[in-house]
Amino acid sequence: MTKQPTSSEARERVLDAAAKLFTERGYAAVTLRDIAAEVGIRHTSLYHHVPGGKEELFVEVTERHLQQHRRGLVASMAAGGLDIRAQLYGAAEWFLTEPPVDLVRMAYADMPAIAPKEAERLSEMAFQALLTPVEEVLVAARARGEIDYDDLGLIAGGLVGMIQSLHSVPNYAFAEPGVRHQSRQEMAQKLIDVILRGLQVN
């Protein structure tokens, strides 16, 4: 006899499916029917797990995704000790092994489609989850005398944006037999090296 999933297990399956689809397509392009089909249930059954419907589901999975990103990002950078290069390499490794967070789509498509109060809260959460931890390690590195620049929030945002954009490099770029290609992680490390070193000739 097949064991039926518990209510909490079934809800987790719904949340996982919704997170996958919202991450891939964005809020507007995903319907409750899409999520139900991904889980393998009738779409009316979703309201048992999320009575507030699609927006409630989007808010919950986005919160969960951002919280996961913050925990993972902080831990990955902490593994680099007090060396800013190792910390930023850790950030790149985290961002490139996790599904990307499309901040541009969030700002211009997802957030305008939900209640303004929730949009403002999620936007702030995204900033705190993805940019603030990177800015904090840069500020600490400046205090240790490793780097010297005033607007470290700008640098943090630029770094995160560049690293996240490497998700768009197609897999076939790494697949040619017998040819040595840079991985996304190696590309990210080179970008980090350039930013830490600077382009200007002294």
Image (cartoon, rainbow, N blue to C red):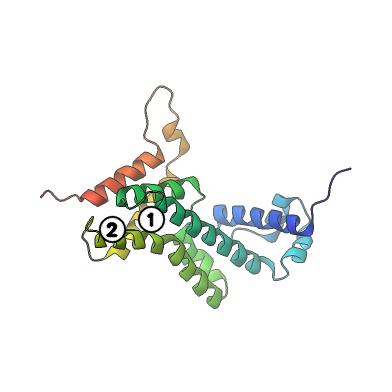
Q: Position of residue 180 (x, y in %)?
A: 37, 27
Q: Which residue does the numbered mark 1 point to in the structure image? A: 160
Q: Which residue is at 78% across, 62% downward?
A: 44
- Residue placed furthest toward the right: 1
User: Taking the image as drawn, is residue 105 in sight?
Assistant: yes
Left or right placement of residue 133 versus residue 17 in this view: left
Quadrant of image for the N terminus: top right
Question: Label 1 neighbourhood size at 10 Å, few (<14), some (14-19), many (20+)?
Answer: some
Which quadrant of the structure image shows residue 155? bottom left
Q: Are marks 1 and 2 in contact (CB under 8 Å)?
A: no
Q: Which residue is at 74% across, 55% downward?
A: 9
**Total marks in image:** 2
Which label sits in the foreground, 1 or 2? 2
Question: Label 2 neighbourhood size at 10 Å, few (<14), some (14-19), many (20+)?
Answer: some
Above or below, 35 against 2 in this view is below
Above or below, 43 against 81 in this view is below
The three-letter code of the residue at mark 1 reads Val
Q: Position of residue 133 (x, y in %)?
A: 40, 61
Q: Which residue is at 49% across, 63% downward?
A: 106
The local secondary structure at tag 1 comes to: helix
Left or right placement of residue 161 versus residue 45 in this view: left
Q: Which residue does the numbered mark 2 point to in the structure image? A: 141
Question: Which residue is at the front of the view, 68 or 78?
Answer: 78
Q: Which residue is at 44% across, 51% downward?
A: 76
Question: Which residue is at the front of the view, 123 or 111?
Answer: 123
The three-letter code of the residue at mark 2 reads Ala
Q: CA distance from mark 1 to mark 2?
A: 17 Å
